[in-house]
Image: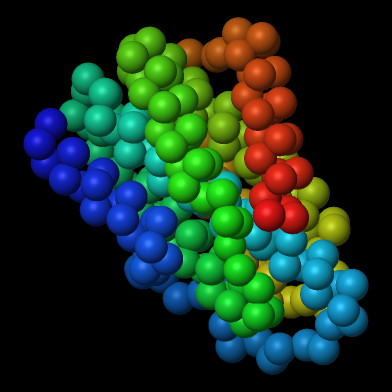
Amino acid sequence: MLDTLIIGFDRALRTLSGTAMPARPVPGAKLPETVLEPHERRQAAGLMRVNHTGEVCAQALYSAQALVARDPEIRARYDRAAREEEDHLAWTQTRLAEMDDRPSLLNPLWYAGSFAIGLVAGVAGDRTNLGFVVETERQVEEHLTSHMDRLPQNDAKSRAIVEQMRDDEARHGAMAIEAGALPLPYPVRRAMRAAADVMRAVAYRI
């Protein structure tokens, strides 16, 4: 428990201070930067800010879920997934900087709220906790697919990042199913979607 607390605290500091370091290179890093029209740049930056905020939330969720997980193997799975999500956090932050834009100003609030949700999900038991991962990753995969439709077609660098993120999220969801996830009730899934919609709408602008 102490080790998990220390890891979680370190992860929170890296997440909120903007010092996350990727273990994998940024997808599309070697692609040339394309010239975007001002409205295209605003659109791309807004979408990447939403994605960055989603990764802030992922760090909080996985930290909280690992903290209360009963099975050491499941806790280890959360830690491995969180490390890959930290790649996503760093990649989206890098892309925002390349576009001379910034992360959401409300990231500390998103982190705190997501951590609380992760604790509640974890207290319900490991299989319900895993079910929460499955639903979260399914919804994230859906919204990343929608971003592929909304990103400017010539913004190859952003599109490469989003595509790799989507592949990773699908794998995390499959991991949770393999580990024995229980399906969540429809009202819980609907509430999760509503909360995510609010986050995306606000983070796009603030």
Q: Residue 205, located in which quarter of the rendered image?
A: bottom right
Q: Is residue 43 above or below residue 146?
A: below
Give residue 61's position: percent from left, percent from top: 42, 36
Q: Is residue 128 left or right of residue 28?
A: left
User: On screen, 104 above or below 181?
Assistant: below
Q: Nearer the viewer, residue 204 or 86?
A: 204
Res 28 visible: no
Q: Position of residue 116 (x, y in %)?
A: 41, 27
Q: Residue at x 27, y 24 (%)?
A: 69
Q: Nearer the viewer, residue 7 or 83?
A: 7
- Residue 15 shows up from this direction: yes
Residue at 47%, 34% in the rendered image = 114
Q: Position of residue 19 (x, y in %)?
A: 37, 68
Q: Position of residue 15 (x, y in %)?
A: 39, 56
Q: Quadrant where the N terminus lies?
A: top left
Q: For the point 67% across and 62% down, which residue is it?
A: 48
